[in-house]
Amino acid sequence: MKQITGGVTAAKGFEAAGVEAGVKYQNRKDMALVFSTVPCKVAGTFTSNVVKAAPVLWDRNIVDNSPYAQAVVANSGVANACTGKQGMDFCKAEAECLGGLLNIPADSVLVASTGVIGAQLPMDRIRAGIEKLAAAKAGTPEAGTDAAKAIMTTDTVQKEIAVEFQAGGVTAVMGAMCKGSGMIHPNMCTMLAFITTDVNISKEMLQKALSADVVDSFNMISVDGDTSTNDTLMVLANGLAGNEEIVEEGPDYEAFCEALHHVTTYLARKMAGDGEGATCLFEAEVVGAASKEEARILAKSVICSSLSKAAIFGHDANFGRFLCALGYSGAKFDPENVDLYFKSRSGEIHIFSKGVACDYSEEEATKILSDPEVTVLADMHMGEAQATAWGCDLSYDYVKINADYRS
């Protein structure tokens, strides 16, 4: 497997577009299209929030019940959440509009929205945007980047990736894009993410791979502890790579899972580092845990802690914040047997051991904590399990951004 240039258009048969429709924002792209020239197997995971946006309900039905999917239309600015029957009617109208223009069934069109909750979609602008998308779609890298930009809300940069891998003796490609900056918390996390691949894989194995992967990728990030109404992650596989269909576990399935995990972990880190108001990526690495599940719990507790996040923002080597977060996580461990380290590109420092602070340099610790990517490493000395979680620091700008979000 190797990382290559591109995003959702990197795999054979995929096209994309991003256009300005004026849904909420002005002078920026705010509607995106991803389209496969042939029908695709589709798998998805969605928000765990009981309050689910209309597009989530629409897409879950397609993933569960439609024979295939072939297109995704997405808008930013308005979430189409808490919008009742009208919101569902608008999803259907979007699918029918795009389906008619592309000559594909409405139940093969996935719909996604992100933005302000409670507002109805401006369907005149949405329909006009869909017409622009259908006319603009292309299989170029630039078209993929346009789509990635069009789903951004408070994101500061588009997020996309592509990789090549071998399956059945042929080269297959996987590309992806996502958006996510705020309302991000484990349990699928707030995001829209679309993964495209030309590998030939059964729907059952595609869903199996995706459901297993999110546990250690997108479910291991948090920006602010809020789980959205619109979380949507979907994978479209059109089979154009030409490999023999993957219908069971084996080397080809493992190669696919490896590529998928590289893509999802890359995007998860990008989202965490681009958290609203963030100045750095905050990583918690737990090793020596009693079980994999306890390692995940411990790591997520550290990156979800507001006090830990504030300490990272202040470049403050206040190890008590991180120990406290480990302690209330629910996992059982001996606090007298924990080692804590800070790591970054500036170096590594041992900060806490055997129940007391180490003899460390505050200046060196501050230097390490001042880098754009910072890791807190906790060795629990309880077993062999490990896990990593990703978040960001908590800055003044987070409150500013969210206090004015509807303005």
Image (cartoon, rainbow, N blue to C red):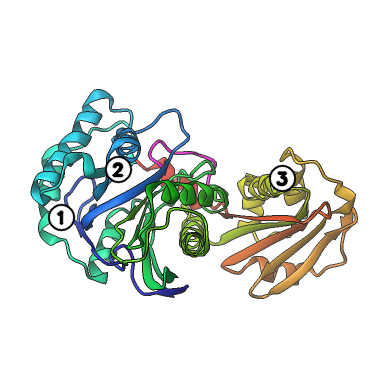
Q: Does label 2 or label 1 sit earlier along the sequence?
A: 2
Spatial separation of the CA atoms under disc 3 and disc 2: 34 Å
Residue labelled with disc 3: 294
Dot label at residue 113: 2
Indicate the position of residue 327 as horizontal and vertical percent values: 77, 42
Determine whether the residue tagged by mark 1 lies in a helix, strand or loop. Answer: helix
Q: Is residue 72 visible?
A: no
Q: Residues within 10 Å of mark 1 (few under 14, many from 20)?
A: many
Mark number, residue 164: none
Identity, as a three-letter code, of the amino acid under mark 1: Leu
- Near mark 3 (Cα within 10 A), the count class, few <14, some 14-19 or many ≥20, is many
Residue at 38 percent across and 31 percent down: it is 52
Residue at mark 1:
133
Q: The magenta stretch spans which residues?
A: 223-233
Residue type for callout 3: Glu
Q: Which quadrant of the rendered structure holds the C terminus? A: top left
The x, y position of residue 34, in whole percent, is 25, 55
**Residue 161's quadrant in the figure?**
bottom left
Structural crowding at the residue carrying mark 2, measured as other residues with C-alpha within 10 Å and reported as few (<14), some (14–19) or many (≥20): many
